[in-house]
């Protein structure tokens, strides 16, 4: 019997938007994942001083975005860990806590290209399968170029399929083409600050929650980031 593979979709989700939800659904369908867990970073290490909404609100928005989507849930594990939320620590602790499951970390192409700057980023394939989805026009060609340069660091070996590479321990690194939705959290924050509408960029329940807490959201997205 093959073990279930759980998709782990990490992000800041500041806020969660339709691009996140669609990409996760398409990866789950393409790779037959048993379930997908969104894992919001409590203290995101990569966000260059951008103001971030409080963790409980980002969590609630993720729950609203996934409401009614069977097999999709929000995992709050990063709340409990002190210090920056490093993906390698998340994947390592998932492996220790749930030895009967396999995990597949889901990330966009832009994030694959930045893996060398993550803590042990090129070693994530020792902890989980990796699923990389197209984003912002970055596709299979960029995936191939990245791996041509980084295969040794990632301990990745090509297969006959240019979208699939072998990783240590029988794991796989797979490129998944997904429908292109040019939505980003930063664009949503910019629109919000200008008083423009965000309908259609986030789910209706998410938009309603943001508007219910409008003062806190505006303050959250404009306050200086603590050093
Ligand atoms: P920001 O604009 O603040 O940088 P973001 O929109 O990229 O944020 P994150 O929370 O940083 O959102 O992203 C989490 C994951 O979702 C990343 O792997 C990212 O590549 C992916 N992602 C974000 N937006 C999209 C989108 N429109 N389509 C597909 N994947 C996306």
Image (tube, grey):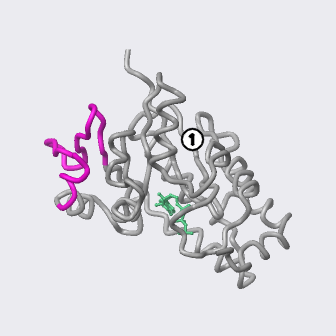
| Residue at 74 percent of width and 62 percent of height | 54
Quadrant that contains the N terminus = top left
* Residue at figure coordinates x 22%, y 58% from the top left: 150
In front of the other: 107 or 200: 107
Q: Which residue is mark 1?
A: 37
Q: Quadrant of the C terminus?
A: bottom right
- Where residue 163 appears, as percent x and y from the top left, is 25, 48
Whether residue 213 can be seen here:
yes
Q: Is mark 1 within 8 Å of ligand 1?
A: no
Q: Is residue 80 left or right of residue 116?
A: right
Q: Which residues are magenta?
A: 149-174
| Residue 161 in the image, given as x and y percentages of width and height | 18, 44
Q: Position of residue 55 (x, y in %)?
A: 71, 57
Q: Residue furthest top?
A: 1
**Is 155 or 71 nearer to us in this picture?**
155
Q: Residues within 10 Å of mark 1 (few under 14, many from 20)?
A: many
Asked if residue 9 lies left or right of residue 110, the reply is right
Q: Secondary structure at mark 1?
A: strand
Q: Is residue 179 depicted above or below 72 in this figure?
A: below
Query: Any magenta on residue 34?
Result: no
Residue 71 x, y percent position in the rendering: 58, 34
């Amino acid at each position: 019997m093959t073990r279930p593979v759980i998709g782990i979709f990490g992000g800041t989700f500041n806020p969660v938007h339709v691009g996140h939800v669609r990409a996760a659904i398409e990866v789950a369908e393409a790779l037959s994942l048993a379930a997908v867990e969104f894992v919001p970073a409590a203290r995101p290490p990569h966000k260059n001083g951008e103001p971030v909404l409080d963790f409980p609100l980002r969590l609630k928005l993720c729950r609203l975005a996934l409401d009614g989507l069977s097999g999709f849930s929000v995992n709050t594990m990063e709340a409990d860990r002190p210090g920056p939320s490093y993906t390698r620590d998340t994947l390592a602790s998932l492996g220790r806590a749930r030895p009967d499951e396999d995990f597949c970390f889901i990330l966009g192409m832009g994030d694959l290209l930045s893996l060398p700057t993550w803590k042990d980023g090129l070693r994530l394939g020792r902890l989980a399968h990796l699923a990389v989805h197209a984003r912002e026009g970055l596709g299979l060609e960029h995936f191939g170029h990245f791996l041509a340069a980084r295969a040794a660091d990632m301990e990745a070996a090509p297969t006959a399929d240019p979208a699939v590479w072998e990783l240590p321990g029988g794991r796989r690194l797979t490129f998944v083409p997904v429908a292109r939705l040019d939505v980003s959290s930063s664009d949503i924050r910019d629109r919000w600050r200008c008083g423009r509408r965000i309908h259609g960029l986030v789910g209706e329940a998410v938009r309603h929650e943001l508007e219910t807490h409008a003062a806190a959201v505006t303050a959250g997205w404009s306050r200086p980031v603590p050093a």
